[in-house]
Every structure is written in C-alpha cells, then in structure tokens.
Image: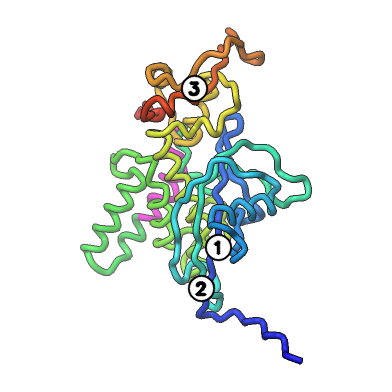
Amino acid sequence: MAKAPRKAETSIDATTADLVAVLVAVTEGEPKIMTIATALPSGPFQFGHRSLQTGLRAWVEAQTGHPLGYVEQLYTFADHGRTGDARAPHRISISYLGLTREDQVREDSQAHWSGWYEYFPWEDHRAGTPPLIAKIVAPKLRAWAKSAESTSVQKARSQRAAITFGLDDRAWNEELVLQRYELLYEASLIPEAVRDKRAGEAAVPGRAMISDHRRILATGIARLRAKIKYRPVVFELMPAEFTLLQLQRSVEALAGRTVHKQNFRRLIEQQELVEETGAMAAETVGRPAKLFRFRHGVVAERAVAGTKLPLSRS
C-alpha cells in the first residue's frame, strides 16, 4: 500500500501571499475601517481561488459576513523584516481598497468598525493642526534629524520632516499619509518600528497594528484622498439619498480637511454629479434640507472630475 505523501513543512525561506483589505465606510461624518482585533481583514491566497480579487472577497466575507462592493487593488508589499518575526516565512501582502457602508457585520464575527484617525491622529486637520504635531511629532523629528552623524544627512532629514508634516511654514499635503507613517517608522517613534527594530521609543500616539497592516492602511487612506479629487468614488460611501451637507461632511472626513462650503456646492452642481429627489430631510436643525442622489448616468456621459476638493487653507 502506497504511503500518503508527507505534508510539506513551511520553510523560513518560503514565500507566502496574503490578501489584505482596507475596507472603508463613513458614518455620521467619521471615516471608519473594518478591523479584526489589531489587524485588517486578510487571508492567504489559495490555489482554490479563481483570482486574487475573488480570494480577497471570499476571505472578507468569511471573516466578517460583509460582502464587498467596490474594490480596487492598492499595492503589493514585499519588504523583509517588517513582520515582527525574523523566523517567519517571507510574506508578500497584496492589498485592496474597498468602499462600503457601516452595516452587515455578522453578529458572531470578531470584526468591528474603528475610526481611522485612532490609528493616525496626526492626519485629522478638520479642526486645525492637531496639537500633538507641535508638542510631540515636531520635537522628536528634529531631535532625530540632529542625531545623524553628517551635516548633509541632518539637513535631508530636517527637510523631509518639514515637507511631510508641514513644518517650518510649509503647507500640509493631505495625500502624504504613507510618507508620514514611513518617516515616523524610520525615526523609530511608533510601536511597529520599536517591535521590528527592537529599538527606539513609541513616542507618537496612534493605535498599532500587526505586521505591516498600519502601513497598508496608510496607503489606502492616501489613495482614497487622491482619488476623491478626480473620481466620484465618495458616492460609494453615501446612502441612496443624502443632503449636500452630509456629502460635504463625508468628503471632509476622508480628506481630514475642511472645504469651502459654497465653492464645494458650486462644483458639485456644475459637474452635475447629483440630482434632487424631491424629498426633504426629516431630521435637520432649522430650515429643512433637500435630499439628493448620485446621478449614475454622469459616469457614462463623460469623464468625471470628482469633487475637486476646494479645501480651506486657513
């Protein structure tokens, strides 16, 4: 009788591929992400999966009970030494961005919705520059810059900190989410860097995640902040009917910046992105607000320029 084949052991030289989902929703003007404990929904790509995306959809639905709608591939991460375990097999993380609404999480699931600014508190500038940048981030980055051995490296580090975090009177660029996270990692100021390098001090607030998941989340936030400026993807996050103020608050939540109200409404109307439903919002303070819906036909009619985000720079 032939012996059954031995199960192959996982070698530290092996490479595995994980499918990771950055699943985003906006609820009452706050951006949320779906998490499972300290991780994003994820699972290994298996031979039974017809494609990478079908594999991702299968894992997310199995883990959360939440079917995926809009999905696009983000980035493939293949760096060594960013998992916290040097003995673990080399993992390739293939990440995706999914847009949905905060509902349909299975009751027996460990998945839950978390505010994404809990992970990146320095990214929310809707009420002005977060105090932690001046109190913690800037001093720590300046000390890190000065710790370099050569003057040229000190200068390069200082310039990089100023550009990414809007220091020294430089403008804040809301799209540099990943660059800011990577800078804090390089300076060993966040828990993931302390874990991976076994050195430094987790001085900057923000919830940590396993492996490279907060880095992947930063990539998803940056992609979405850029994308809402030239594609109407924000409507994937909106209910079927909404007020213009709800739409504005959702855009501001994603961008982490306020927008100029009148300019924003003018642009939405000029691009013919929405149409009136004829109904009024039931729960509004003061004058009743009109309800609108997204004009799906506009996508087929022409190339849409997104919301263009008339951000307030004050």
Vertical position of residue 223 compared to residue 82: above or below: above
**Residue at figure coordinates x 32%, y 65% from the top left:** 147
Left or right: where does residue 270 sit relative to residue 72? left
Identity of the residue furthest to the left in this view: 152
Residue 128 is one of the magenta-drawn residues: yes
Vertical position of residue 165 compared to residue 193: above or below: above
Label 1–label 2 contact, CB within 8 A: no
- Give the residue at mark 2: 15
Q: Quadrant of the C terminus?
A: top left
Q: Amino acid at mark 1?
A: Asp
Counting residues from the start of the chain, the first of labels 3 and 1 encountered is 1
**Residue at figure coordinates x 43%, y 45% from the top left:** 222
Between circles 2 and 3, the one closer to the viewer is 3
- Give the residue at mark 1: 18
Counting residues from the start of the chain, the first of labels 2 and 3 encountered is 2
Vertical position of residue 146 compared to residue 299: above or below: below
**Which stretch appears magenta?**
127-141
